[in-house]
Amino acid sequence: MKIGLLQLCSSDQPDENLAVTTDLLRKAAEGGASFILTPEVTNCVSSDRAHQDRVIRTETEDATLSTLASEARALGIWLLIGSLALKTEGGDGRYANRSFLIAPDGRIAARYDKIHMFDVNVSETEQYRESAGFRPGARAVVAATPFARIGLSVCYDLRFPHLYRRLAQAGAEILTVPAAFNDTTGAAHWESLLRARAIENGAFVLAPAQSGSHAVHNGRPRRTWGHSMVVAPWGEVLADGGTDVGVILADIDLAEVARARQRIPSLTHDRDFEGP
Ligand SMILES: O=C(O)CNC(=O)[C@H](CS)NC(=O)CCC(=O)C(=O)O
């Protein structure tokens, strides 16, 4: 089957981002993709709380979700909206960083709220406190489709291998890692971590990414790493999106999951042990 990754450079204007995303989604479908994926925070990249409060909507009011779900239906494709920043009802006023799997009939087949929050000082000038704006999820999700079982994750989750272990042990054959990796840690770690998750779990890793220069964050534009990737279960990088905004297409053979797991059955060799 053919996979389409959308590499975006989302701004802090959801309407603009939706127009670009819709256009690229149609291109990916024209290119033959039957499963298309968008990056983390497809609808809005911003760290300005007052601005976010003006433009971010709840799940039921969000135009990105309803429009892309209708597009998926019109195109007859499976769609992973990597994530949307959404207002949540109740709770403490923080947003959800929520991933959606949309079926070809336009219905929501699965939702997943990012579990691990990026509260990190990347350098003295680049600091993130994702948990100040977003409320973390607490439930891992595997969704069944006619072509594969899909384990959902988002961005910084990539650094927590036990999450992917659980997803693979629950049957996931494809692991999705939509991201907005920053360009410092992206250069150092992105490809290695993606390949490690694919190899250690014998699964395809599909990682659509934000790329380029976004809305100002801590007084400077926020830069993301791009390099959207498709990684095979044996660890080969089947596609690397570079840094341009656009569509990345890759053919995958899902039989490779069983082949990789037969050659190295480590997924079934976990053992309980004591200490340290
Ligand atoms: O802020 C938003 O709008 C949405 N959230 C994100 O983009 C998050 C928090 S800043 N980014 C990451 O998790 C990058 C992880 C990363 O770069 C690493 O693990 O090295």
Image (cartoon, rainbow, N blue to C red):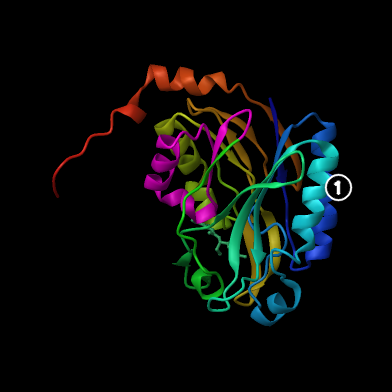
Q: Is residue 96 above or below residue 168?
A: below
Tell me the residue that label 1 is attached to: 23
Image x and y of residue 13, in percent: 78, 67
Image x and y of residue 84, in percent: 66, 60
Image x and y of residue 193, in percent: 46, 43
**Is residue 152 found inside the magenta-colored segment of the image?**
yes
Q: Is residue 189 above or below residue 219?
A: above
Q: Is residue 254 above or below residue 119?
A: above
Residue sticking out furthest to the left: 275
Name the one closer to the observer, 177 or 219: 177
- Over which residues does the magenta segment extend? 145-174
Q: Residue at x 48, y 36 (%)?
A: 195
Q: Is mark 1 within 8 Å of ligand 1?
A: no
Res 121 seen here = no
Name the one closer to the observer, 112 or 10: 112
Image x and y of residue 199, in percent: 44, 31
**Residue 261 relative to residue 266: left or right:** right
**Residue 267 relative to residue 177: left or right:** left
Res 224 seen here = yes
Q: Quadrant of residue 11?
A: bottom right
Q: Is residue 39 above or below residue 165?
A: below
The amino acid type, in three-letter code, at marker 1 is Asp
In the rendered image, which quarter contains the N terminus? top right
**Is residue 173 found inside the magenta-colored segment of the image?**
yes
- Quick one: label 1, few (<14), some, or many (20+) residues within 10 Å? few
**Residue 162 relative to residue 226: left or right:** left
Q: Residue at x 78, y 65 (%)?
A: 14
